[in-house]
Image (cartoon, helix red, strand yellow):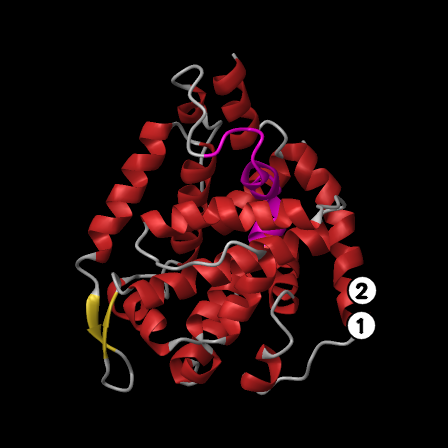
Amino acid sequence: MLDELIRKTIREMVGGGGPPVAFLTPKGDRGLFGPESIAWKVHADFMSMMIGGISSLILQALHPQALAGVWDHSSFREDLKGRLGRTAFFIAATTYGSTEMADNIIDKVNQIHKNIKGFDEFGRPYSATDPHLLSWVHLTETRSFMQAFEGYRKEILSSSDKDQYFLEMKLLGERMGAKDLPSTYHHTNEAIKDYIPELYFGDRAKSIFDLLENFPSKLAAKPFIKLISRAGYLNLPDWVYPLINRPTPSFFERLAVRKSIDLVAAPVREALKDGVAAHSLRRVYG
């Protein structure tokens, strides 16, 4: 009963249907990374991935040209759940899917990007195939996912394991068109900081913040979604808060949110234990 309620609440946030049977075939196919990869470990935790997903969306919204592509060519303002769901499926398919599934969705997204171009809010041209913008999206996503995993998953990764994650994800980012991506945690954080002069917290970005803080949902799902959104906000780098004219969260605020996440994480992980990662393991090992 509780498991089904949790799954229903999660579908309220990101969509999705029944068991992910598409990940069961073809037998023996290891996909792009394989079960021994750090990507499989990090991306298997729904709680930290959702928190990381929220913080990466916030960061991406601060780059006017990256935001313009979504602003002009996406229905995310009317269908935020659909946007999160599509992103979640892309991560699932490229991490856990068969080689064919991963290749197909990479090709599909790359084809879509070819038609996304225009002018940002300052009148500057942008293109979704621009390696500089693609790198920004990749850097903010991978940093956010790892930061959330460290903060909310009770599992310690060694420094070499963390770096291995960024090396693995670099291969995916480059297939999406990004170039010269860093292959360590430290250099990823440094590369993100290089973009600071390009960032802008204007009306468009503010509307994204408002949308995420007031995520459209049914009443029963609101407390859970509000908590995830707050954790995503706290998952940002400290240098972001002055940029968005907000105080840096206190130690006690972070602690309170972390404890709240701990309380809900166990039943959520139990409810999702037979999810995409588990199905994919059965595909690989039979």
| Mark 2 → mark 1, Cα distance in angstroms | 6 Å
For this orientation, the residue located farthest to the top is 286
Residue at 80 percent of width and 57 percent of height? 259
Q: Nearer the viewer, residue 113 or 245?
A: 113
Magenta stretch prevailing secondary structure: helix
Q: Is residue 27 above or below residue 50?
A: above
Evaluate whether residue 246 shows in this view: yes
Callout 1: 10 Å neighbours few (<14), some, many (20+)? Answer: few
Callout 2: 10 Å neighbours few (<14), some, many (20+)? Answer: few
Report if residue 69 lies within the magenta region. no
Residue 220 pos. (x, y %): 61, 52
Residue 131 pos. (x, y %): 31, 63
Which label was assigned to residue 251? Answer: 1
Q: Does the residue at mark 2 contact the one at mark 1 (Cβ under 8 Å)?
A: yes
Q: Identify the element where label 2 is drawn.
A: helix
Left or right of 236, for residue 266: right
The boundaries of the magenta stretch are 33-50
Residue at which label 2 appears: 255
Evaluate whether residue 86 shows in this view: no
What amino acid is at disc 1? Phe
Report if residue 43 lies within the magenta region. yes
Q: Quadrant of the N terminus?
A: top right
Q: Is residue 160 above or below residue 235?
A: above
What amino acid is at disc 2? Leu
